[in-house]
Amino acid sequence: MKTTRLTMSQALVRYLAAQHIRRDGVENPFFAGMWGIFGHGNVAGVGQALEQYASHFRYYQCRNEQAQVLAAVAYAKQRNRLATFACASSIGPGASNMITGAAVATVNRIPVLILPGDIFAERIQAPVLQQLESEHSQDFSVNDCFKPVSRYWDRINRPEQIITALPEAMRVLTSPADTGAVTLSLPQDIQAYAYDYPAEMFEKRVWQIPRNRPDAAAIQQAAQWIRESEQPLIVAGGGVHYSDAYAALEAFTARTGIPVCETNAGKGALLYDNPVNLGAAGWTGSDGAIALSAEADLVIGIGTRFSDFTTGSKTAFAREGRRFININVAEFDAHKHSALPLVGDARAALEELDAALGGYAVAEGYRARARACNQAWDAEVHRIYNLEHEPMLSQGEVIGMVNTLTGAEDTVLSAAGSMPGDLHKLWRTRSHKGYHMEYGYSTMGYEIAGGLGVKLAVPEREVWVMVGDGSFLMMHTEIVTMVQEGLKVNIIVVDNHGFASIGGLSKAVGSDGFGTKYRYRSETGHLDGETLPIDFAKNCESLGAHVIRARSREEFSRAIKAAKAHRGGPVCIVTEVDRRQRVPGYGGWWDVPVAEVSEMAKVRAARAEYEAAKKRETYY
C-alpha cells in the first residue's frame, strides 16, 4: 500500500480539500476553507498545515472564535447545507468560545466542522497553560463541553485515528437528517505527530446526497387524509429550503389550493404575493395564518420541527380532532404530535403526494378565503411601512424602507431581539433565498458574523444585516474581517437604547422593562438615569466601515440608496427608533411564565391573564 508521511494536521487539511458533494447531478467542493485563530494549542499543528497548503485550501482570519462558527453556520445555511467551513482554535478559552456556535449549528441542523485544540495527549507537561484540571479524571478538558451540542464528537489521541474519524465526521456533516456540529478535539502534540497515511485517503471523494422517499403506503394514507379534510393547512419550514422544494411546493399548492403559512426558517418557501401564502405562522404570525391555523382540521408540516413559536406553545392548532401529517427527513421530527410520518426528502415527498392526490383541490370558498387573507395582510404591511411615526422612526418603517428600496434578489439577515418577529411578519419575500433568519437558537451576536458568512456564500447578492443595538454590542468585530476581505455587507444598526424585545416582554408579564434599558445608575441605586451616550456610528467607523447616520425617514431613504451605490467594504447605517412604537400582535400566544405571587398589581393582573391563556394549551 502506498503511503505518504504527513503530520496529523497536514493529513487533515489535505483530506478536507479532497471532499466533494453531489446532489441532483450538481457537484461542488464541500469545504470552502477553514476559519481559525491560532494559539499555542494549534499554531504548530493546524496553523503550519494551513500555511503549507494555503494555495489548495483557503484560510480565513477572524476576530472571535464564536463568530467564526456563526459565519460558517450562515454560509452553510445559505448554501442549503451543501457546503460549509471548518473552524479551528487553540485550547482553553479559544476552544470553549466555540461552544455557542456549535449549539447554533446543531439546534438548526446546519453542518459545521469544529476543530478545537486540546491538552497534550502524552500528559507529561500537565497542567499546561489554559488547562482545566479535574481531580476525578485526567482524560478530561473543556472540549468535553462540546459533547451535548455536537452531532458527532471525537478526541484524536493518536495520529492514525483520523483515518477512521474523518469519514465518520463526513457521514454526519453530509447527512440530510442527522447533521449539525461535528467536533474533532485535537491534542496539541498529536497535531504535530507524523504518520504514514494511506495515499488513497487524499484522493477526491464525492459524497452523494440522497433524496430519500417516504414509504409508499404512508403516501397513500396521507393522500386519503387530505381528501377527507375540509380545511387543510401547510406549515412550511426550513426543510423546504434545504430540499430546494420551491417549485414542488408552488405546483402542489397551485393545484390543490391548500393555504401555506411559514415558520421563520421556512419564510420564502413561497413568495409573499402567492395567493395561498398566509404569511408568518405561530406566535409572530399574521392574523390570517393565526385564524386558519385555529380552524385547520389537517396540518401538513413540511420540514419543520414545530417549535413553540410555530405552535403558539401548543395553542395555535385548536380545532378538536385535528390531525397532522409531517414531511421530514428526520424521523424524530416526522413523528411529532402523533403525526402520520412521511420520512423523506421534502421535494420528493411533495411530488409523490401530488401524484397520489390526482385531481384533488380544496373548495373554492376556502381557496378564496386564503386569497383574501393574503391581500388583507399585504394591506396591513403597507400600513406599518408607511406610519410616518414622529419624532423618531418606528422599527416597522425601517424594515419597510429596507424592503422597498432594495432589490428582489437581495438577502436580509437577522437573529435576535424584536427584529426577527417583526421581519417574520412584515418582510415581503421576493426571492426564495432573500430571507435569512437564525431563530432556532436566536443567538445575539449572530447578525454581523452571519452576514459575513452569507456574503461569502452568495457574493453576487447584496446582503442587508438588520441588528439591534443590544445584539450589536455583543459581537460586531467581524466588520474588521469584512474590511480585510473587501466584502460589501450592508449593516443596519437600529438604536433603541437597550434590549427592546425583552423590555416589551417584561411589560407583558407585569414588570416595567427592568434591566433592559441602557441608562446610568441614578441616586436611587437603580439603572434609571440618563440614557448612555453610545455612538454606534463612531464605533463602526473605527473598525473600518463606511458609515451613514440617518435621523429621519428622508435621511434613511437616502442612506439606503447611498449604501447600494457604495463600492468596497462594509457599510453601516445607524438609525434611532422609538422602542415604544411596536409592531402589534395578531392573536398568537407564547408561554412565558408570570410570577405566581407578587406585591406588584400589574404582575398579579398579568398572572391572571396567563392562567386563563394557559388553559388553551393542549397535547397534540
Image (cartoon, rainbow, N blue to C red):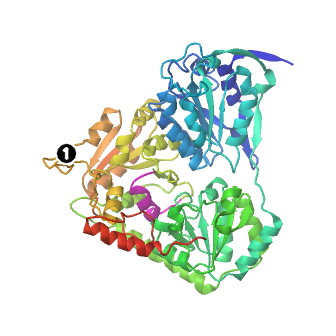
Given the current orientation, which residue lies at the most extreme right position? Answer: 1
Tell me if residue 476 can be seen: yes
> 152 above or below 295?
above
Q: Quadrant of residue 22?
A: top right
Q: Relative to the observer, which residue lies in front, 2 or 307?
A: 307
Given the current orientation, which residue lies at the most extreme left position? Answer: 523
Quarter of the figure with the C terminus:
bottom right
Q: Secondary structure at mark 1?
A: loop
Picture coordinates of residue 267 (x, y %)?
54, 60
Picture coordinates of residue 485 (x, y %)?
47, 31
444 within the magenta span: no
Look at mark 1 in the image and give the residue it sits on: 520
Q: Residue at x 78, y 59 (%)?
A: 213
> 363 above or below 550?
below
Q: Residue at x 48, y 36 (%)?
A: 66
Picture coordinates of residue 76 (x, y %)?
59, 44
Q: Quadrant of residue 363?
A: bottom right
Q: Relative to the observer, which residue lies in front, 133 or 107?
A: 133
Q: What is the magenta range? A: 415-430
Q: Is residue 289 left or right of residue 123?
A: left
Badge 1 local density, few (<14 within 10 Å), some, or many (20+)?
some
> What amino acid is at disc 1?
Tyr
Q: Relative to the observer, which residue lies in front, 615 or 332?
A: 615
